[in-house]
Amino acid sequence: MKTFAVALLAGLAAAVPMTDIEYKFINYVAKYGKSYATVEEYEARMENFIKIENYINKVNSEGNTHVAGHNKFSDWTEFEYSKMLGGKLETQATAVSQV
């Protein structure tokens, strides 16, 4: 499986010049040992990563006393992250929307 991911990344890198965000995503994949079963999953995970990247840039541009950054969950969907938290994220959102 990891061989497929490495071959996929190498093929993508050789085929088309990478944007900065694609290069950052590939480094993220390597750093956290990620692997994806299909090209479609790779692309979907990269889209999730880009959404988080945009959020991180927004938070960091606001002059807060903390700095946001990527972690091993940066390619997850909101649903996956919520599920890991035991669905608490969805419960809180539902409770807030009912007020």
Image (tube, rainbow, N blue to C red):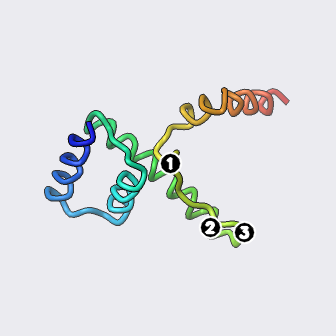
Q: Are marks 2 and 3 in contact (CB under 8 Å)?
A: yes
Measured along the vertical axis of the image, is residue 73 above or below residue 26?
above
Label 3: few (<14), some (14–19) or many (≥20) C-alpha neighbours in 10 Å = few
Residue located 81% across and 27% down the image: 98
Which one is earlier in the sequence, the residue at label 1 or at label 2?
Answer: 2
Tell me, for residue 60, which label it has, or none: 2
Residue type beneath disc 2: Asn
Residue located 56% across and 37% down the image: 78
Residue type beneath disc 3: Asn
Which one is earlier in the sequence, the residue at label 3 or at label 1?
Answer: 3
- Give coordinates of residue 51: x percent, y percent: 49, 50
- Give coordinates of residue 74: x percent, y percent: 50, 48
Label 1: few (<14), some (14–19) or many (≥20) C-alpha neighbours in 10 Å = few
Residue located 26% across and 62% down the image: 18
Q: Which residue is mark 1?
A: 72
Secondary structure, mark 2, is helix
Name the quadrant of the C terminus. Answer: top right
Tell me, for residue 64, which label it has, or none: 3
Drawn side of residue 50 relative to residue 11, left or right: right
Closer to us: 9 or 19? 9
Secondary structure, mark 3, is loop
Secondary structure, mark 1, is loop
Q: CA distance from mark 2 to mark 3?
A: 7 Å
- Figure disc tally: 3
Between disc 1 and disc 2, the foreground one is 1
